[in-house]
Amino acid sequence: MKLQDIIKLNQSFKFDYLSQDRELTREVQICLIDLKFLLGIADGIYGPITKQATVKFVQAFNLPELLNAAFAKKLIEAKYYVPNSSLPKCGVDLIKFFEGCYLNAYPDPLTKSEPYTIGWGSTKKRSGSAWSLGESISQQEADELLMYQLEKNYLPDLVKIPCWGELNPNQQGALLSFGYNLGSKFYGSPKFNSMTKVLTDRDWPKISETFIKYCNPRTNVEQGLLKRRKAEAELFLKPFSHEISPRM
């Protein structure tokens, strides 16, 4: 049996069922290895180490300890997330593409002054204090700061959007980029009535025209923001497949 079969059957099994199905166990192991929950090789044997890794995976995604459709879908989807995180990788990649990484603090392109920015568009230190011109960080510090701030300062607000749990990784990734650029508390804000309405109504045919409303028209950053909004809308509407790669 394969993970796709678990989804189609829509039945629940205890994890110990894996000890009877080496093909399924190997597939699960490959996914867990890719996600850094499991070390070693995928041998198809459901032993204590594989069991521990499987339990860690469901705990990381707040799933019941059952081999069911929800488990199979999340394990397949998880390759689109940053390992050991609930952040959609496509959203992190989009942020990095448009922000660029600068290891020396620089002025805001719109105000030409504060807030000063560093790394992948971070305007605050881990402590919450502001950056100053003349400060610098390493590449590793920039990467770690981005992930830390996305998980601690942005994702908690985004998951409060009523339809968040219904969205696929591409849709969540688009909103992660949007929120990182314009503020994580955009949903419900008076300045974002159009986006709030589209998300509330699940009115996806209007999502593209809604994204591009937020590009600071008639400013020196309009063209750059317009490109970003179009990319976010394209990602949001990009079909997401639960199919796993042939090597699985």
Image: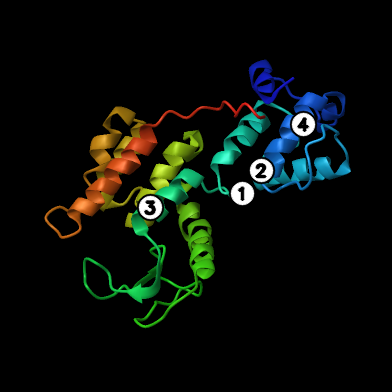
**What separation in Å lies between label 3 and label 1 (alpha carbons)?**
19 Å
User: So how many labels did they put on this image?
Assistant: 4
Q: Which of marks 1 and 2 is in front?
A: 2
Mark earlier in primary sequence (3, 1)? 1
Crowdedness of circle 3 by 10 Å Cα count: few (<14), some, many (20+)? few
**Residue receiving disc 4:** 26
In this view of the protein, which residue sits in the foreground, 106 or 66? 106
**What separation in Å lies between label 4 and label 1 (alpha carbons)?**
19 Å
Question: Is the image coloured rainbow, by chain, by secondary structure, or in one colour?
Answer: rainbow
Q: Which mark is residue 97?
A: 3
For residue 107, side relative to residue 121 (left or right): left
Q: Which quadrant: the N terminus?
A: top right
Q: Residue 83 carries which label?
A: 1
Crowdedness of circle 2 by 10 Å Cα count: few (<14), some, many (20+)? few
Q: Quadrant of residue 239?
A: top left
**Residue receiving disc 2:** 34
